[in-house]
């Protein structure tokens, strides 16, 4: 099992990820209401809350994936390393390379395992064969998948198990050398054994990445995160150290949710 | 309510099954009769010289050399014109076009165009390409007309193939910093290649069989030379067959039968390739 990191690292005064007064609308419907949050580098933050509370939408603001949905309007600020990523001069494609994303359902490309991990490098125009090979190996090792697939790198990624596919997707994100990993319920489609592996992985990845994870599994949030944010109806209700949220929440709504009286 | 005995439900089931089998058998038998009849009539004429001879007024010396050459040239130009336009239009409509009333209207009408009788395209081609553009009864005019005919099919099948690619793959690529075009080029198109190819081949086999529009735009029945350029006059296999069947001599009927065998083989082979590609690609991409 994953050992929970009791002593949270001294928080950086400079925040890695930040949002200030963020409002998001789907057409007329407001999905996020005045959300402000700060996340430090090399921490794991869990977003919890009932379905439709806006936590996934909020997560997707950090790599501007909501841009793809028609009719989405955003105001407020989202900052990464103190830069507002919704400013016009930001190159969204360059910027997304700094932020890796792992989705709920494993979504490997219908290509070989190797080509899946190499994809991010190839779209960057990377030509050096040895650099690509080294990076693929590095990323697969980081994702704790190397030993399982090193002899079948050229097999189709569709053929491996769901748990392996999800770790492959993590490797694929890592290969672009991001500093942030966004995970949208990364283990919800996996069996318990694969879930444990992903959780262990998140624990080790924390040394190199700032991780934000959306989860419906409260034990999971308690096990792996340093801080937890509870969302309800598009609002950030409470955001604090995970230990505090789960033992002594400040707000009654949070307590009702985590004790299962609601949601 | 009285319960009907189980027997009658079973009987209904059996009657329906027999009815379905009979319908299938009827279709298959008709097709078989046609094929057998054609083969018996035409097989005697199917030898090498049938493929290499020019048309002639003596049926035994007549061949499909120029008709085959014309058909191949016609198809070649048709595909060169229709493929890039059709595929790009399909990509635009599915990936770039905003989903609003106008695009839905365009979509529906493209599907409608795929069902327009081919002779209408022939008349359009006659006015626009043959007369207004002054192309005369050239291969180019014929190819442009056939391009119009198969473009809706290519657009629709390209869109269907692209639509079948799960959105999660696009999001994964975009999340890695790929641009829209990189995502389409490296993920969406490879994953939908089988479907697009199937559409292309099926539209090709449709174009092969088309006779009416070519008659309208002036494919000639008697062409004693093979075309050398896009502005040459031409004939095509269906035209040649059509011409032969309208002759009174029995010998030409045999020629027509032999020509039909060749045409059918062409179509079957193309459809076979389409099915093969589809199966191969669908297995590979697991879509």
Image (tube, coloured by chain):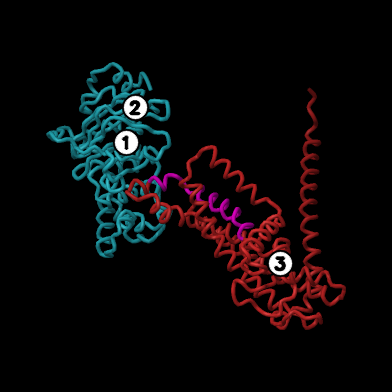
On screen, residue B226 above or below B212: below
Front label number (1 vs 3): 3
Discs 1 and 3 share one subunit: no
Q: Earlier in the sequence, mark 1 or mark 2?
A: 2
Discs 3 and 2 share one subunit: no
- Which range of residues does the magenta coloring cover? B147-171
The part of the image, by quadrant, that contains residue B51 is bottom right
The residue identified by callout 3 is B218
The residue identified by callout 2 is A32
Q: Which chain is red?
A: B
Residue A61 bears which disc, if any?
1
Q: Is residue B148 magenta?
A: yes
Residue drawn at x 80%, y 43% as measured from the top left: B15
Q: Secondary structure at mark 3?
A: loop
Residue A23, percent from left and from top? 32, 27
Residue A159 in view: no
What color does chain A have in the rendering?
Answer: cyan
Residue B275, percent from left and from top? 60, 60
The part of the image, by quadrant, that contains residue A104 is top left
C-beta proximity under 8 Å, tags 1 and 2: yes
- Front one among B40 and B16: B40
């Amino acid at each position: 099992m994953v050992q929970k990191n009791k002593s949270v690292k001294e928080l950086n005064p400079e925040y890695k990820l930040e949002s200030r007064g963020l409002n998001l609308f789907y057409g007329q419907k407001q999905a996020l209401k005045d959300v402000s949050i700060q996340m430090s580098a090399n921490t794991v933050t869990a977003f919890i809350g009932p379905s439709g509370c806006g936590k996934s939408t909020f997560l997707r603001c950090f790599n501007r994936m909501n841009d793809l949905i028609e009719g989405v309007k955003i105001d407020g600020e989202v900052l990464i390393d103190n830069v507002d990523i919704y400013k016009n001069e930001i190159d969204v494609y360059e910027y997304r390379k700094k932020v890796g994303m792992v989705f709920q359902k494993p979504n490997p490309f219908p290509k070989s395992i190797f080509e899946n991990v190499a994809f991010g490098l190839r779209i960057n125009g990377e030509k050096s064969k040895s650099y690509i090979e080294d990076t693929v190996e590095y990323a697969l090792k980081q994702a704790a998948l190397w030993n399982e697939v090193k002899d079948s790198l050229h097999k189709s990624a569709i053929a491996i198990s769901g748990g392996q596919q999800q770790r492959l997707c993590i490797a694929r994100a890592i290969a672009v050398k991001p500093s942030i990993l966004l995970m949208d319920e990364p283990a919800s489609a996996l069996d318990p054994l694969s879930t444990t592996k992903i959780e262990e992985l998140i624990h080790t990845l924390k040394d190199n990445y700032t991780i934000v994870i959306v989860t419906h599994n409260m034990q999971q949030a308690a096990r792996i995160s340093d801080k937890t944010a509870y969302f309800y109806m598009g609002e950030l209700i409470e955001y604090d150290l995970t230990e505090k949220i789960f033992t002594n929440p400040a707000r009654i709504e949070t307590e009702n949710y985590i004790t299962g009286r609601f949601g | 309510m009285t319960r009907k005995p189980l027997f009658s439900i079973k009987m209904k089931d059996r009657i329906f099954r027999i009815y379905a089998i009979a319908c299938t058998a009827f279709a298959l038998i008709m097709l078989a009769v046609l094929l057998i009849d054609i083969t018996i009539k035409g097989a005697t004429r199917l030898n090498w010289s049938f493929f290499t001879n020019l048309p002639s007024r003596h049926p035994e010396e007549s061949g499909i050399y120029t008709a085959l050459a014309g058909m191949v040239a016609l198809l070649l130009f048709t595909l060169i014109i229709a493929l890039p336009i059709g595929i790009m239009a399909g990509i635009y409509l599915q990936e770039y076009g905003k989903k609003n009333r106008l695009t839905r209207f365009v979509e529906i009408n493209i599907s409608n165009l795929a069902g327009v009788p081919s002779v209408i395209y022939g008349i359009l081609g006659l006015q626009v390409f043959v007369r207004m553009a002054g192309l005369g009864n050239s291969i180019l005019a014929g190819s442009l007309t056939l391009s119009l005919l198969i473009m809706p099919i290519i657009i629709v099948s390209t869109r269907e193939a692209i639509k079948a690619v799960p959105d999660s793959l696009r999001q994964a690529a975009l999340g890695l910093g790929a641009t829209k075009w990189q995502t389409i080029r490296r993920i969406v198109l490879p994953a939908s290649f089988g479907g697009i190819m199937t559409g292309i081949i099926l539209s090709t086999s449709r174009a092969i069989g088309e006779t009416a529009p070519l008659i309208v735009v002036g494919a000639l029945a008697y062409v004693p030379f093979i075309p050398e350029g896009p502005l040459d006059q031409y004939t095509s296999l269906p035209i040649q067959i059509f011409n032969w069947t309208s002759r009174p001599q029995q010998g030409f009927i045999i020629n027509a039968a032999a020509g039909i065998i060749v045409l059918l083989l062409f179509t079957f082979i193309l459809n076979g390739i389409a099915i093969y590609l589809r199966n191969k690609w669908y297995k590979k991409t697991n879509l």
